[in-house]
Amino acid sequence: MKEFAVFWGCTIPTRFPFLEKSTRTVLDAFSLPYRDVDGFTCCPEKSLINNIDPTLWKLTAARNIAVADDEGVDVVSPCTGCVSNLSTVKKGLKTNPKEAEEVNAVLKKAGREFKGAADLTHLVPFFHDKIGIRKIKDLMKKDFKGMKIAVHYGCHMIRPSHALGADDPISPKKFDNLLAALGASPVKARNKLMCCGQGLDRVNQHDNALHLARIKLRELKSEGADALVVCCPSCFLQFDNNQFLMEKEGEKFGIPIIYFTELLGLAIGFTPEELAMNSHRVSVEPFIKKWEGRDTTEASEAIEEELSDAGVFGL
Amino acid sequence: MQESLDFNLLKMCADCGACYEICPSSLHLDGYDPRAVIKDILKGEHEKWLTSETIWQCLECHYCLEMCYQHYGFESAMTALRRLAASKGHFPPQLKKGWDLFIKSSRLGDPAMPARKKLGLPAPAKSGVDEFAAMLEAYKESRDQ
Ligand code: SF4
Ligand code: SF4
């Protein structure tokens, strides 16, 4: 496997270093060839920078990609926004040589050149496509049989699909496949693909942000979900922090929000403490308690059978 | 507006509305009505939207783009209006704060050092802030030429 740099983005190191912890923990456990690279900046955040100065949005993203190009690495990110932004700019410049030339004329003065050689992948499709479910199953020590775990893709893991090509943009499968591999029972939710709505918090519309979070959390509560799994710091912020704020005001949901790397970490044998899961605002306790209290005999073989029937290994 | 938007596509869009069914803001936020906005753009009456909250309610989820038979997406109209609004100094205060932080530091916050230490995380990689500043200078020069 080609060496890759983890693009941490701004939100994880700033607000959620514990998510960096679980991400590093699973990357190490799978002995993956990753390293930190000096020189990255904000990807930059699209809704913020692109709305004010689209040229600067492109320049900044192109420079980040150029850093990876110069280091000879691919890029993997645990943030959907970062991958989507970088990929959108990469695609735009790759298909518009004139624009790439203009961008490079500026980058040259900062000592960089955009070539767009680095592959850019989000962690979820990365695990699905490059590590593979077979390898995950080899390392798995505990499954999630009997646990109802809802999945939230995060818009920017899969859209815009012309730039990402990560999964079907309307009916994605990869995150679901990974959860199925871990033995989790899916939760049917009408609002499964609905945007988390965190963007509204960035434009001074907090009540609207809460409103969108509420719609999803209510549905999950009524479906009896034990947890919601996400893999984007923005979605995490929306469902963990904003749920916490609503609960403080008396509205109870009780849906623990689990990062994909935490769930995977638990499955391969790490403890919640080792994964720093006590840092969430909505407690993960109820989920962990129920999970540890299950009767786990015969689970593993049943999963193997179900997965084979579903053709997951043939992907 | 004519410069930044394809009015032929917009005309189709004003009569279509197929993506209302999946647009989270159309479905769940009162008063979010992209077709009303688009009709005003076509009439040359977009001015009034520049100071509205509506244009900032598009979540840039790109769902409309994926569903659209024109591969257009009414987010395009919202983005054009947001850019115009921003160029005239109308934007949510938080956005301005984020922008200023980005320009100054090249990112949206510094790594949380005490927490990193407690978690046993390695020292964070160096940011590209100096190079970013050089790029910014070069960009300004090229723009002013
Ligand atoms: S990108 Fe904006 S307009 Fe399009 S579906 Fe999402 S919220 Fe609606
Ligand atoms: S963006 Fe496309 S699908 Fe949506 S209303 Fe316009 S033309 Fe129709």
Image: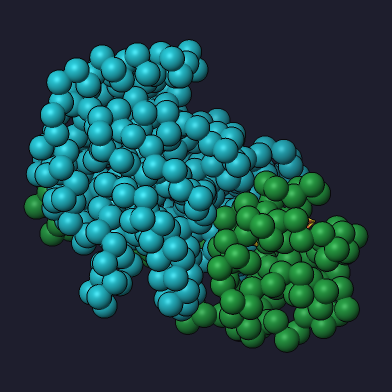
Relative to A170, say whether A49 is above or below.
below
Q: How is the image coloured?
A: by chain
Q: Could you say which is closer to the camera, residue A15 or residue B129?
A: A15
**Residue A103, percent across and down?**
64, 50
Q: Could you say which is closer to the camera, residue A54 or residue A217?
A: A217
Residue located 38% across and 37% down the image: A186
Drawn side of residue A296 relative to residue B29, left or right? left
Residue located 74% across and 50% down the image: B68
Chain letter, colour cyan in render: A
In the rendered image, the quadrant that contains the N terminus of chain A is: top left
From where the camera sits, is residue A189 visible?
A: yes
Residue located 75% across and 84% down the image: B47
Q: Could you say which is closer to the camera, residue A157 or residue A27?
A: A157
Circle count: 0
From where the camera sits, is residue A313 visible?
A: no
Relative to A148, say whether A118 is above or below.
above
**Residue A71, percent across and down?**
42, 33
Q: Could you say which is closer to the camera, residue A291 or residue A130?
A: A291
Q: In which quarter of the image is ligand 1?
A: bottom right
Q: Colour of chain B?
A: green
Drawn side of residue A85 relative to residue B20, left or right? left
Residue located 81% across and 49% down the image: B70
Drawn side of residue B96 relative to residue A4, left or right? right
- Identify the image quadrant of residue B10: bottom right
**Residue B76, percent across and down?**
71, 61
**Residue A192, percent across and down?**
48, 48
Relative to A280, say whether A208 is above or below.
below
